[in-house]
Image (cartoon, rainbow, N blue to C red):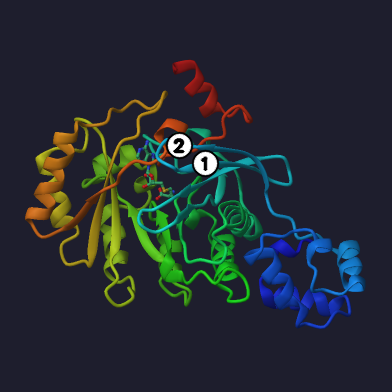
Amino acid sequence: MNLAEFDRAELELALAGLGVPRFHGRQIFHWMYRRGVSDFAQMTDLGLDLRATLAQAAVAAAPALVTRQTSSDGTVKFLLRLEDGRHIESVYIPDTPAQTFCVSTQVGCAMNCGFCLTGKMGLTRNLTAGEIAGQVRVLARETGLGATAFNIVLMGMGEPLHNYDATMKALRMLADEQGLGVHPKRVTLSTVGVLPALERLAGESLMPNLAVSLHATTDEMRDRLVPINRKYKLKELMAVLKKFPLRSRGRITFEYVLLDGVNDHLVDARRLVALIDGLKAKVNLLPLNEAPGIPFRRPSDERVNEFARILSDRGVVVSVRKSRGRDIRAACGQLIVEAVTHSPGQLLAERLS
Ligand code: SAH
């Protein structure tokens, strides 16, 4: 039995099955999440008998830390090993001004966006809820931030809405007051817009902030850059977003990667303004993080600023994402498990570099 896969109600039920009083669930949750402890022997406020019972019947495993790499800007990339030997990456981004953990939801990704290195790997498998929440357990422990308020962005490897149930369960586990108590308003879920799942998300009670990877303003261009657009067209996506419930003062973030000479023209900026007109929205521009094997270039800073100015002159709230951790390949779209797997994408990247 892996207690890491249980929310607290499930944990308490499992304990009852072992003849253990339910209230110990709170203590165990506290140890696992707040203190980052997986070894029952270290849960010192549990009786020795109870620790022995648990050790015999269960584990509380978190992903194993393989390496951590620190960027010159303070960003830290963690390579984690899962129980089946597969690897994922998670990133700690300090002082933005918040402390932010960027977490993966899948090993690889099936979305295959044209400019994203993770997408080149293809999808290996979904992460479980325990593996998604487990990244936060490990990062909180490693950074010592378990007792403070931090943000979580589901912007690592994978498409969260393509692994819906595990992602939502992980958010429930992370929100638990006996654990890390991460309020959903501190969580941002980033998606290409898997429409049926997005409609389902609209009905959730634990509602994270929403970021949508838009990247294009016409179906023709988006079909090319974000292949899921061939299935769910821009018009349908925008219609769902228009009805999407937002918390008070909440806004939908539109992420827009800027590719030199591809989607960074004046006309694109004007179309973008028109597309999001009437929505409570903000735009986050992401100048491309270049990588070997990615057939696009990053526009000049002047071009990026010009694009941003067109939006802001027309009343759109816009920011330019400062790329963090590029020197250690921890930046957006650069997460790929190197030197561990030999995915087609990695081989391609190696060949082209
Ligand atoms: N699948 C989700 C979560 C990934 S979030 C989604 O697509 O939203 C990662 C963000 O970084 C997405 O907006 C993605 O489009 C963007 N991204 C991917 N590759 C990038 C690159 N090379 N440079 C800049 N941003 C990139």
Visible residue check, residue 270 = no
The image quadrant that residue 31 belongs to is bottom right
Secondary structure found at label 2: loop
Q: Amino acid at mark 1?
A: Lys
Provide residue 87's location: percent of width, then percent of height: 63, 40
**Which quadrant does the C terminus fall into?**
top left
Q: Are marks 2 and 1 in contact (CB under 8 Å)?
A: yes
Residue furthest left as drawn: 313
Q: Quadrant of residue 264?
A: top left
Quick one: quadrant of the N terminus?
bottom right
Q: Which residue is mark 2?
A: 71
Q: Is residue 289 above or below residue 272?
A: above
Q: Nearer the viewer, residue 262 or 23?
A: 23
- Circle 1 crowding by C-alpha within 10 Å: few under 14, some 14–19, many from 20: many
Q: Nearer the viewer, residue 235 or 313?
A: 313
Q: Quick check: 126 left or right of 24?
A: left
Pick the residue in front: 314 or 178: 178
Residue at image point 13% right, 38% down: 265
Is residue 343 left or right of 293 when viewed as pictured? Answer: right
- The x and y percentages for residue 22 are 78, 82
Q: Which residue is mark 1?
A: 77
First along the sequence among labels 2 and 1: 2
Residue type beneath disc 2: Ser
